[in-house]
Image: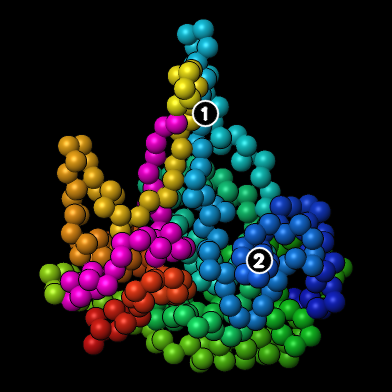
Amino acid sequence: MLKEYFLDKDELQTFVQRLIGKYEVLGMKLEDGELKYSRINSVDELRLPSSHRPLVPPKKWFYPERETLFTYRISRGRVKIEDSLKKLLTMKRIFFGMRPCDVRSLHILDKILLGRFHDPYYGIRRENTLIIELTCNEPAEYCFCTMVGGGPYVEDGCDVIFTRISEGFLVETRTVNGAKLIENNKDIFRKAREEEIIERNEIIARAYSKIEAKCVDLERLYNTLVRIYDSDMWNDYSEKCFSCGKCNFICPTCHCFDIYDEVDANLSSGARVRIWDSCHFLSFTRVAGGIVFRRERTSRVKQRIYHKLCYSIDEIGEISCVGCGRCIEVCPSKIDVREIIAKLEG
């Protein structure tokens, strides 16, 4: 399905305007001076920077931090349930300019949420959203995607890839839906020339060379984690950790949740709600009788690291860290997962 096209920088606005007219468009834009993934309502809002990625990942657009799963109402002895899934069936979205690490994160969430236990709310959002990846021409400060098998350019998991080159964008189609999107706008796209493809390849090669983190031997890392499970090094990290949960909520692949029921005062109506949860919270493993299985902070620090780098391999066949560096950026104690991996490798 791979085809390579060129979009002149002067035609970008035309393309985006057409998308806004047909889809709900999501992408990077400035809000209060901060780059965020958000709804794009006009052409001039969309940002396609050569570097940098939003602090908050795209996860919330597919797996909201708070979501009403269904509401109910009791009337005359009968219960009427309204499933929120119905409202998502007509969704038609394009995510324009998703960073490669975030594209990889959705691939991981797909394995988790669309695998043995299928999450229909996540699934319908994924199915109805076309993904346009934006290559990272320059790595950002906290990036270590190459350390965990990723990179500033990822071929799988998206429908179209945009790479900024000198006079516009080198555009690649990766899926049938991506090919249809470009074909429907073929009047502003043309076949890419050889020199444009070469320029794209050189940009990607330079971006890889600028990321200092080298790819680790994940099998060796897995075996090391199994061997040092009871190491005192985890106590050192737990002494620094505040158990604030920032790393979980800002992570593009963390997916743990809690479910509770909201009941109106008249007891005749209510809702079932899902919210994000954190394995760092003391309440995360609290069960009936007030027993907490991971009362010690060390066990909670280990849980996060082991889930990312060890348990995920057993569960989905790969680690669930994409090297975006968000957890490093927000940690008040400056706990750096790159240092942990380097120590384990050493």
Q: x, y percentage for residue 193? A: 76, 85
Q: Residue at x 48, y 18 (%)?
A: 266
Amino acid type, label 2: Asp
Q: Which residues are magenta?
A: 233-262
In the image, which disc is placed on residue 151? none
Amino acid at dot 1: Thr
Q: Residues within 10 Å of mark 1 (few under 14, many from 20)?
A: some
Label 2 residue SS: loop
Residue 345 in picture, x, y percent from top left: 26, 84
Looking at the image, residue 326 lies above or below residue 127: below
Which residue bears the numbered disc 1? 71
Q: Is residue 82 above or below residue 325?
A: above
Q: Is residue 241 magenta?
A: yes
| Magenta stretch holds residue 48 | no
Task: Single out the mark in the foreground, 1 or 2.
Answer: 2
| Residue in the picture at 82% in, 59% down | 18
Q: Residue at x 18, y 50 (%)?
A: 293
Which label is found at residue 32? 2
On the question of residue 175 being in view, the answer is: no
